[in-house]
Amino acid sequence: MKFKTLLISLVILLCVSSNSLAQEKINLSAGFGILELANIGIRYQFEQAQIGLSLGTFPLSRNRQIYSVLGDLFLHLGGSSELSKRKPWYIRFGLVYLYKNFGTQNHLYINSRLGREFNISKKVGLYIDFGGNINLVNSREDNIPEPIEPTCCQGGPYEYTFIPAVGAGIFYRF
């Protein structure tokens, strides 16, 4: 239920912001990645920086899902593009919060990545980034067993101090 509330809030924020702020400052994104899961997000751009919020989910079965909330800062540092004033190479810093609905498990990671955007047009582009997630907080309030083959995509334990981060997706500039 918390995830649905966050998703509705993100959609409302997108609708209000796209009408009230300057064009091309708002970006909508959709992607998939380790710990960010299948996600949608919104980014606000100022100069060569962006701040963003993404919500993700990954269904493991009918009653088992993982949810993620990401808050990120993107600093565009290098290269140039004919289709955008924004430099295509960036570093990304942020926090990743994960919640598993099968049992009460909460995880908080700090993430750092290096990435690149590939502009397809003045409005649409692709992105890919690589880096790492460092575990800050792990809490578990029940004794529901983990899956037999624990991996991050199957909902297994996230008790490692470091987890590689890989993400890819598409974005649209309003």
Image (cartoon, rainbow, N blue to C red):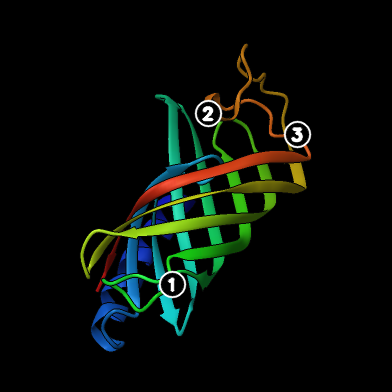
Query: What residue do we see at 58% from left, 62% from top?
Result: 92
Place residue 112 in its image quadrant: bottom right
**Percent x, y of residue 89:** 49, 64
Is residue 1 at all visible to an observer of this figure? no
Q: Earlier in the sequence, mark 2 or mark 1?
A: 1
Three-letter residue code for mark 2: Cys
Q: Is residue 80 above or below residue 138?
A: below
Q: Earlier in the sequence, mark 2 or mark 3?
A: 2
**Percent x, y of residue 9:** 38, 66
Mark 3 surroundings: few (<14), some (14-19) or many (≥20) residues within 10 A: few
Three-letter residue code for mark 3: Glu
In this rendering, position of residue 93 left or right of residue 127: right
Question: Which sits in the foreground, 67 or 81?
Answer: 81
Mark 1 surroundings: few (<14), some (14-19) or many (≥20) residues within 10 A: some
In this rendering, position of residue 155 left or right of residue 162: left
In this rendering, position of residue 30 left or right of residue 141: left
Tell me the tag on residue 87: 1
Q: Is residue 37 above or below residue 89?
A: above
Q: Secondary structure at mark 3?
A: loop
Q: CA distance from mark 2 to mark 3?
A: 14 Å
Tell me the tag on residue 153: 2
**Percent x, y of residue 122:** 22, 70
Which residue is the site of mark 3?
A: 159
Three-letter residue code for mark 1: Lys
